[in-house]
Image (cartoon, grey):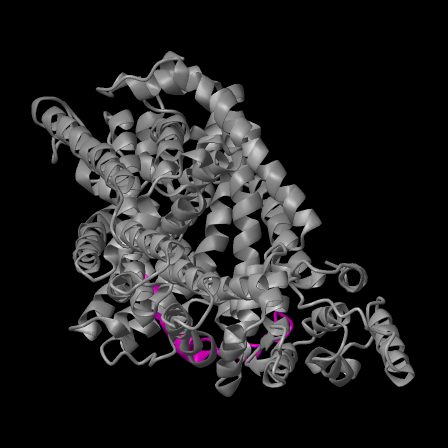
Amino acid sequence: MSDTPKLLDSGPPAKWNRRSAFILAAIGSAVGLGNVWRFPFVCYENGGGAFLIPYLVALLTAGIPLMILEFSLGHKMASGAPLSFFKARKNSEWVGWLMVLVGFVITAYYAVIMSWCFNYLIQSFSLGWGNDPGGFFTDKLLHLSSGPDELGGLNWPLVVGLALTWIAIYFAIRKGAKSVGKVVLVTVPLPWLLLLILAVRGTTLEGAGAGLNYFLNPDWSKLLDPGVWLAAYGQIFFSLSLAFGVMITYASFLPRKSDINNNAIIISLSNCATSFIAGITVFSTLGFLAMGAHQTVAGVMESGPGLVFAVYPMILNQLPFWPGFFAAIFFIMLLTLGIDSAFSLVEASAEAWVNKLGLKRKPVLITVCVIAFAFGLLFATDGGLYWLDIVDNFINKFGLILGGLFECIVLGWLYGARKLREYANRDSEIKIGRWWDFLVKYFTPAVLVVTFGMDLVKTITEPYGGYPDWALFAGGWGVVAVVFVLSFVFMRIRADKNRALAGERGGGADE
Amino acid sequence: MSRSTVVLLALIIAVASAEIEGPPTTVGPPRLESGTAAPGRSARYAERRLLVTRMGEKGADIEGSADALAEIVADASEDPGLRAAAADLLGLVTVEVADGEELPRILADALVEAALDGDPGGWTAGYLAEISRRKDGAVRAALVVGLMVDGGLAEFHRSLALDGRLALEAREAAVGVIGALEGDWAYETLAGLADAPALPDGIRTAAVTALAPIGYDEGRAFLRNLARQDLSPGLRKAVEEGLATIDRTQYMTPGAWIMFAIGVILLFGGSVLFISIAIRRGKKHIFSDESDGEP
């Protein structure tokens, strides 16, 4: 297109200087705490080793296709998520804002979780959580109140950790792709290396086989359960950083001729491989704990924060040598796993505003970080964990899933899956066929509709977590509603005049 | 399960246990004299039954009547069905034992008292076995057993060993409840039961079966020692099956190894394959590292 050079001049401030930087950054975004504390538990609950079959099928039929969809859009439109959707279909800009806002809300509490990791890291060398890590977590670290109505005061160690997290995030992305490209050279391989060290340590512990049996022993009968297949699609969808606008933004920083399809495959497979190795690490050590305590692995198994902040420290306490060293490794691994997911979400928000208002990057970035930090303070209070739990549940179940659904509808149906497929194939060594159109237009939306419907019915019939209705309305439905309303409000904000000049690049003119 | 359902269920058990004669029951031996013996006793039974019925109604102050309910549960001479109904209600009364953690402590204490009372019919074990058979009941039963502390646990343990043919089935099931409890105490209790030649084979077999999933190396050594003793065919078979269970639990099965290999080959192998394609392409085609994407 004739206006492409203008876009590149006024658009993203920097591009990836190496392909590996882009791949590492995208892997870093996809791989996060969920790979460690969610995947192993989902796998165990849904047939153990047999779950790998629906998981791989979901990867091939939804994960990689959606990744290609987002890369194609971001690369073709060379913009953050809202502007990319604007260029694809003028009235669909709100879908991009919805994705970015969902990501923004998640970053606000994700940073608090990283603050927990900071605090645990400080305690690591002396195993400061003592013999009751669960009690340390809820009582000493979080000062957990009796319920969401008792917010209590700010928890200063958490606030300090939160501030450090936001400073780290700011410096990681202050120069966009240029600084991110350097940071991910450390924050992506390092947790991998540490995870491998922990996996080796775990598998050489007594009782590791018992844990791995729980993780991998296949229960084939589970394959007949539709719920297991939905769990596989849910896991793939949640773990690949899809529908946050991150992959769209990162792809927009790619040079003109890039292999979109292979990048998507490498990133998706690497994410799943990380989940797999995390499962081996987690379950081998759980086997060690179970054996020592004369319990079944199921008896010691927990998912979510309970696994990494209560069960895992208990395991670290019992390691025969260097427990402090392995504890530090574990929490550094969590921090480095989480930081690139967090800054990728902030990057998507910042880029969206830079695109929209045509402002300089630095003030926009500082504003986004400060607002997110302020929002995150809610979760750094004595009752913060309850609010974190409520917001996390609703924003993932409804904000994220609906974001993905609308993305498929807008891009697959309104813009045209074929156009994006042809664009993706243009410079890709591995070509995708028309089956991809089917997956994006019919199959993935159908899976998302079913998942959304089931979640909606369940949430209405069984109030989540036994929380009071007012808390679920304020922190759950309320936050989701605000995110939707703001998506349309932001779409209506008057855009920078240069934005209109920015059009598609690559094959845009041909179409 | 709502309170009224619980009470209805318990009263049905009470009626059934008063009518059925002969076969073992999970809530202890039937007491046909219930409510019909001495006039004073009959009046007390009627009064207690009324209390239990009233407490089953919606909005009843169970906590306020917890002591009276505990008295019914602990009374070995009371009708077993009524005791079960009272115990069910008492299970709804929780006491804060740690910050925010509420547990049915009063029920556990009442059951310990029942065990201390001699519990000739093994009613305590029978009741726990009964609730463990309900939906999600094993966890609840194990929780209650876990709340029986120190001396209480020992008494409960002893009550399982009491001779009482009618309560045998109940006691076997209660041994399974201990297995569900897991942990060091459960393992040691089960090992103690399995290694007690004076106990009926059924209880020892149940103990071996419950011990295997939490035994690991220690359990294997214990069962191998047990196998050297003179055992009945049924118990020997249980020991052999227990050893096989420990092996299955502790070591990766062939199926697990196969899925491990599939995971490694597809995920790691796949990543390596596509990265190598990308590297090859980068070298000979567009987008080498410093090219900024230009050919």
Q: Position of residue A346 (x, y in %)?
A: 39, 52
Count of numbered circles in the view: 0
Whether the magenta-drawn stretch holds residue B29 is answered as no
Whether the magenta-drawn stretch holds residue A161 is answered as yes
- Determine which quarter of the picture holds residue B6: bottom right
- Examine the rendering and report whether any part of residue A407 can be seen: yes
The region drawn magenta spans: A141-168
Q: What residue is shown at x 48% (from left), y 31% (from top)?
A: A224
Q: What residue is shown at x 34% (from left), y 19% (from top)?
A: A423
Q: Nearer the viewer, residue A205 or B199?
A: B199
- Examine the rendering and report whether any part of residue A167 can be seen: no
Look at the image and tell me in which quarter the C terminus of chain A lies.
Answer: top left
Q: Position of residue A450 (x, y in %)?
A: 58, 33
Q: Is residue A293 above or below residue A126?
A: above
Q: What residue is shown at x 47% (from left), y 64% (from top)?
A: B203
Q: What residue is shown at x 43% (from left), y 73% (from top)?
A: B198
- Position of B39 compared to A236: left or right? right
- Determine which quarter of the picture holds residue B80: bottom right
Q: Position of residue B273 (x, y in %)?
A: 16, 29
Look at the image and tell me in which quarter the N terminus of chain A lies.
Answer: top left
Q: Is residue A388 above or below residue A398?
A: below
- Seen as rendered, the residue at the extreme left is B283
- Position of B163 compared to A50: left or right? right
Q: Nearer the viewer, residue A406 or B148?
A: B148
Q: Nearer the viewer, residue B60 or A168?
A: B60
Q: Nearer the viewer, residue B44 or A99?
A: B44
- Position of B102 compared to A135: left or right? right
- Position of A177 compared to B99: left or right? left
Q: Position of residue B112 (x, y in %)?
A: 59, 82
